Amino acid sequence: MKRLAVLGSTGSIGTQTLEVVRNNGDIQVTALAAGSNVNAIEAQIREFHPRIAVMWDADAAKELAVRVADLPVRVLSGMDGLIEASTADDVDIVLTAVVGMIGIRPTIAAINAGKDIALANKETLVTAGHLIMPLAKGKGVRILPVDSEHSAIFQALNGENPREIAKILLTASGGPFRGWTREQMRDVRPENALKHPNWAMGRKITIDSSTMVNKGLEVMEARWLFDVKMDQVQVVIQPKSIIHSMVEFVDGAVIAQLGTPDMKLPIQYALYYPERRYLPGERLDFWKLNQIQFEAPDMENFRGLKLAYEAGTTGGSLPTVYNAANEWAVGRFLDYRIRYLDIIEIIESSMAHHQVIANPSLEEILATERETYAYIESRWN
Ligand code: NDP
Ligand code: MG
């Protein structure tokens, strides 16, 4: 029986992961970790009986320990807790679905401990891909993508020689503001941006999808996962999210993965790879589908994507600045403290201000994150 640790178990990906576990019935959940949602994790503990449960927040951990005192579960907190959950002897695979750069340390620790990684937390590869991919290779552990586009690419590459990739065609819905000008986006409020046309996701990634920053992060994620150059990753707008991504090979052949939008498919594929299991749900009906529409992305009105190409092409510590500035800005936007278009302004000005470090260590990446926050706070608060 496969033994699984879920980091970010109470979120959108985390709960869908546990749904996959529940439906299949042959994965043992040995650790669960989340931020501060005591009610949700308590219910999960009672259903899945993990040996370790982690609340990032120390007070939440104390409260949780009292609530589950009747169960044989160890309750931990903070970064030490996340690392223990992802490196314990009784874990085979760690699914990382926390939001943001908090995922880096536990992921590196898990790889060092020889655990396979089912990776949803894209911020980890964006900022530390140059450390994580060689480390995983050296340790012989698999990085199995959970992000739907990257899972599609991974599926398209089954049995292929990765050196024969010409380019990766990363599809994007374009989000709720596709076709809008910057002028039209000026007064967007969080409740407008939180409506995604095809996917129900966590709050941060939903905002990122609306600004196309999510696609920018995914281009950088793809570059590391599939060992290609930034300019080999081409974003293609496909508004209905039916094609989840494609690979073009050197001979001109294009292989795509299609399906109805359901994150449980890439989650289940990562957990059971290379096996495919039955997954209940809607199927594509090609008789009704009759057309699939494509467009080029609008990098002038959605500058977040253009900035991602700049950050990824320069590389080094610049993707960390891009990501950290976006994390900060999206948090403030959701709290109604900055305006929608400020998100991109903040990313752009943080990138312009930063002195790039060519091949940053983990400490330098984390220091770059702190410095980016300090810079933004001195200018925008
Ligand atoms: P959610 O906001 O829905 O969930 C985030 C999870 O992380 C929650 O369980 C939350 O716990 C937990 N968490 C937050 N902060 C911490 C912390 N400091 N320590 C431990 N746990 C923490 O996010 P999503 O599920 O949408 O996204 C998770 C990741 O997956 C992101 O990197 C996202 O980009 C990526 N992703 C998501 C997709 C989706 O469809 N949702 C698709 C592709 C990628 P609590 O509930 O207690 O706050
Ligand atoms: Mg995605």
Image (spheres, rainbow, N blue to C red):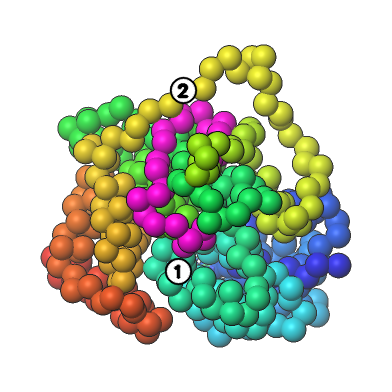
Looking at the rendered image, the quarter that the N terminus falls into is bottom right
Residue 243 highlighted magenta (yes or no): yes
Tell me which residue sits at (60%, 83%) in the image.
112
Residue count near mark 2 (Cα–Cα under 10 Å), binned few <14, some 14–19, many ≥20? few
Q: In the rendered view, would you say 270 is above or below 95? A: above
Q: Mark 1 sits on what residue?
A: 129
| 72 displayed left or right of 67 | right
Q: Position of residue 241 (x, y in %)?
A: 53, 33
Which quadrant would residue 41 be assigned to in this image? bottom right
Is 343 positioned to the left or the right of 64 in the image? left
> Which residue is located at x 45 percent, y 69 percent?
129
The answer, for residue 284, to whether it is visible in the render is yes
Residue 145 in the image: x percent, y percent? 59, 57
| Residue placed under numbered mark 2 in the picture | 293
Question: Which residue is at the front of the view, 371 or 165?
Answer: 165
Q: Closer to the N terminus: mark 2 or mark 1?
A: 1
In what element is the residue under mark 2? loop
Q: Nearer the viewer, residue 360 or 375?
A: 360
State the extent of the magenta-drawn residues as a range: 224-246
Q: Which residue is depicted at the point 63% across and 51% down? A: 160
Crowdedness near tag 1: few (<14), some (14–19) or many (≥20) residues, C-alpha within 10 Å: many
Q: Secondary structure at mark 1?
A: helix
The label on residue 56 is: none
Give above or below for 51 relative to 125: below
The residue under label 2 is which amino acid type?
A: Gln
Question: Residue drawn at (43%, 72%), measured in percent from left and top?
Answer: 130
Please state the horizontal and vertical placement of residue 162, each as a whole percent of the image: 56, 55
